[in-house]
Amino acid sequence: MSQTFLGLAAADWQALWLSVRISAAAIAISLPFGIALGWLLARKVFPGKAAVETIVALPLVLPPVVTGLLLLYALGPRSAVGSALESTSGLQIAFTWKAAVLAVAVVGFPLLVRAIRVAFEGVDPRLYQVARSLGAARFDAFRSVSLPLARHGVIAGVVLAFARGLGEFGATMMFASIRPETTTLAIQIYVLHNQPGDVSEARMWRVVIASVVLAFASLVLSEYFARRGRQHELA
Amino acid sequence: MSLLEFRCRLRYPSGFLLDAAFKTDSQVTALFGPSGSGKTTILSMIAGLRKPEEGFIQIGEHVLDDTSTRLSVPPEGRHIGYVFQQHLLFPHLTIRDNLLYGWRRRRAAANSVDPERVIGVLDLAGLLDRQPATLSGGQRQRVALARALLCVPQLLLLDEPLSSLDDALKDEVLTYIEQILMEWRIPTLYVTHNAGEARRMCKWVIRLDHGRVEAVGDTRLIL
């Protein structure tokens, strides 16, 4: 395999680019739910709130392999939902890039919700009431006041969940398997690690370094936005 | 028909019971009482931000709450200008956008209040492009007053608008409030626990204690 830009082979760049796209797609899917749930947990008291909090946090402590397995049993070709989807619309999720997106969305969701919840908790709830008293309907007040004031925390959560998605391995392996359309950065490292020879090992280490740099940059970015959110709150 | 009729009951989880009823026809009415007597709760109910367990609220001919018929107009439909104890300006918006927040949402009725005039009366022209964090306490409270006025209210609720200001600023802001009330003649409920302030601003007073109305009448006689 010929080396290309920054010492990474074309296939490695492809894996990196696929990871970025899958992580971005997962964020796009989960962000509206994350914002709604983060706001709900920050602002409302309702029966079963503790159970919802536990379920949302579960992927954080479950082995990712278990999360992938549960997704496979819930949405795989032999499950009720999976077979119904396939027979009615021809849509197959398991063992495709869509499965990788779902796996990344589920695994990153607790981080997203947690950051968004903290961000909303930092916004004075009276500002929402002021907006309502000035003529804004519920969603208008949320969109024009609560969300912009929580934006730094929301962005921090997005970056954190995105970074988590870039490194996702276990759930993706179980639910999406190893295929060209699912070979993300982490799976590429696993594949290279299992190939014999010095060339593969050297390539693997270059991909490892790339993933460390990416993860580090994402964490720095996430912390930057979280800090800006806290400063905003103090102001 | 009264300018404002209020009959509501609400028990807090802490045990505090608000059970108050009053009517007023005065343009500016003081809601007077010590801290914890239920003044702010009454304003929150009138603004629709807190729902009574049982009750009835009517402004002029508009019924806002009637628990017997399960009627409850949402806050955005009540046309009430609410100035909170702290100014509570939106920190992410400029002063101009703060001022026009309600005005833009009530554009249909907004012809009756001219933003230029309000900005002029409250001396806010030089502040329009600034952020709330860069303003003094008195300036912030003037912006909050103007913002409430610009949402074209049928009733103005002023919740201890001077409480966060030092003595020097209090008189300045009070003069601005007097100017506003004189020029726009909007029915106003003025919450205070300062008898001097109530006597200066209001002809009529409702005195509260422990969530109940203790007295209603002429300010000079009751305070």
Image (cartoon, grey):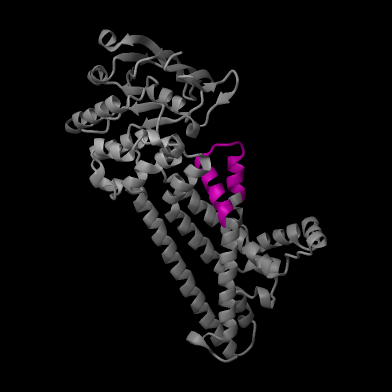
Task: Residue A54: say if magenta.
Answer: yes
* Residue A54 in view here: yes
For the point 49% across and 47% down, the residue is: A143
Q: Which residue lies furthest to the left in this view?
A: B168
For the point 59% across and 87% down, the residue is: A200
For the point 59% across and 51% down, the residue is: A56
For the point 28% across and 12% down, the residue is: B219
Task: Residue A175: say if magenta.
Answer: no
Vertical placement of A42 versus B38: above or below? below
What is the quadrant of the N terminus of chain A in the image? Answer: bottom right
Q: Which of B115 and B52 is in front in this view?
A: B115
Side (left or right) of A135 relative to B98: right
Classify residue B125 by image quadrant: top left
Q: Position of residue A81 (x, y in %)?
A: 77, 56
Side (left or right) of A176 relative to A12: right
The boundaries of the magenta stretch are: A31-55
Q: Where is residue B152 in the image (x, y as percent from the top left)?
A: 40, 33
Vertical placement of B20 versus A157: above or below? above
Q: Which residue lies furthest to the right in this view?
A: A87
Side (left or right) of A68 relative to B61: right
Q: Nearer the viewer, residue B175 or A55?
A: B175
Q: Main secondary structure of the magenta part?
A: helix
Q: Position of residue B113 (x, y in %)?
A: 36, 34
Classify residue A69 by image quadrant: bottom right
Q: Which of B124 and B34 is in front in this view?
A: B124
